[in-house]
Every structure is written in structure tokens, then in C-alpha cells.
Image (cartoon, rainbow, N blue to C red):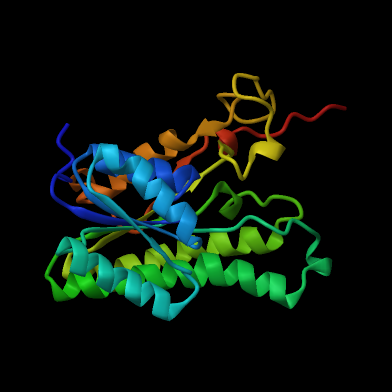
Amino acid sequence: MDLGLEGKVAIVTGGSRGIGRAAAQALLRAGASVMLASLRKESVEAAAHELALSGKVEGMPCDVASEADVERLVKESVRRFGRLDVMVANAGVADPYKNLLDVTVTEWDRMISVHLRGTFLCGREAARAMRDAKIPGRIVTISSTSAFECDPLGGSYNAAKAAIVGLTRSMAIDFADWGIRVNSVAPGWIHTDMSAADLPPRGTPIENLGALKRAGEADEVAAAILFLASSACDFMTGTTLIVDGGQTIVAPKLRW
């Protein structure tokens, strides 16, 4: 199936590892050029070097909570590649997990800044570049099943991911006049280095984890991102695809 990504240009934030890296790999295989962005210069440059066998890719450090950094990321991507068609706003953090009674304002602000402000800035700057170039682009945000079923002790994370769902809908409305589609992916438990301490080894059935009884893989989430980045979703905007192996459809078993 031709996804219409040959010759297109994408930015993937949080692209040096996990879901972001898998998304970058999928976009490269589909024929897009990719600008990887991540907070640490060393890690993003190493990831870009490793992915270079799959296509045209460069790396650039970026703090998505910084307006200046995101503006620079988008402008530099357009300068280097000539255009911008896809923004994958993936960068995020997952700590601290603690009762909201014990969450400090600093911890709260960091979570909201990286996830919500970062998604807003990436979406806004990408849409401005797409509008100015008259490119009907794609913006893909990353929410979580935590937006719909709250993780205990994950109040700030739950709130940030739920807000991304609402922000995605608002951006979809505001950017529609320029042909820009904005959609979100909400992963469940996925095997990445960030979740390694919370999940059993791959191949181990997890009886209480949804219909498929397992955690997902980063490339399974990347497949959904690739779809939303492509021309295959022309009549979709403002929606959220849940990629969770049936995690959110299975009610807990009650024992009396």
C-alpha cells in the first residue's frame, strides 16, 4: 500500500529511543526523510547515525518545553530538507509516580511542560510552517491509555496525557482550513527502556493486561503513527487511536 510518504519530510521528537525511534524507522522505510529531535545531543546524533542505513536522517537536540528550541527545530528542518510534511510530537517523561498529595509544583510543572506545552509548541510551529508553504501536512501527537484509565500514583502524567487528547481536537479544528490533519495515538503498556522495570520479560503472558495478555512493542505503535502520518487518513482528524492490545476494554475480574 502506497502511503504517500515518498519524498516527504518528518520531524520526530523524542526520537532517539523507544516509540520515537521506531516511528522514525517506519517513516524512513516508507520513503520519508526524518529529523530526529531529543533532549541530549549525544543520544540523538548516535540514533541518527544508526538509522542512516534506512534513509535520509539527521539529528538535532531540542527541549520541547522551550519555545525557542522548537522554533529552531522546525526552521532548521525546513532549511535542511526544504519542507515539512509531518510532525510527530512524541517527547515525554514518565516520572515521578507518587500520590498527588506529595507532588511538588516543580514536578508538576515539568510533567505538564514537557507533555502539554511541548505538544502545543510542536503542533503550532509545524502548522505555521505547513500553512506558509501551503502543505496539507500531518501532526501526530502521543497520548496514552492513561488519559482514559488513570494509573494509580500517576496523577500528573494522567492529567498531561488527557490534556493532549483535548489539545489534539482543538488543533484539528484550528488547523483544518489549511488542510492540516491532527490526530493522536494512545499506547497502552509498551516494551521500551522506560517501562522495563515495570514489565515482565517479553514472551511472558500477563493475565491481567487486556485481551491479548501482553505488552506491546514500539514498532506496533509506530505502525499507527505511520498510518496517521500518511495520505491513508485523509478523512480523519481530531481522533485518537488506542493501541493497547485490548487493555482498556477488559473490566477487572471481581472475586467474592
Relative to 151, 71 lies left or right:
left
Q: Position of residue 63 (x, y in %)?
A: 48, 69
Q: Is residue 236 in sight in this rendering?
A: no
In the rendered image, the quadrant that contains the C terminus is top right
Relative to 207, 93 lies left or right:
left
In the rendered image, the quadrant that contains the N terminus is top left
Please state which of residues 56 and 88 is positioned toward the viewer in this rendering.
Answer: 56
Which residue is drawn at the image coordinates 19% and 69% (left, top)? Answer: 79
| Residue extending furthest toward the right | 256
Is 190 placed above or below 186 here?
above
Please state which of residues 208 and 124 is positioned toward the viewer in this rendering.
Answer: 124
Is 236 placed above or below 82 here?
above
Which residue is drawn at the image coordinates 72% and 77% (left, top)? Answer: 105
Q: Position of residue 113 (x, y in %)?
A: 56, 72
Is 104 placed above or below 149 here?
below
Numbered marks: total: 0
Q: Position of residue 178 (x, y in %)?
A: 17, 70
Quadrant for residue 119, please give it. Answer: bottom left
Q: Is residue 81 in sight in this rendering?
A: yes
Which residue is drawn at the image coordinates 59% and 26% (left, top)? Answer: 214
| Residue extending furthest toward the bottom | 68
Which residue is drawn at the image coordinates 16% and 76% (left, top)? Answer: 132
Relative to 102, 124 lies left or right:
left
Q: Position of residue 103 (x, y in %)?
A: 77, 68
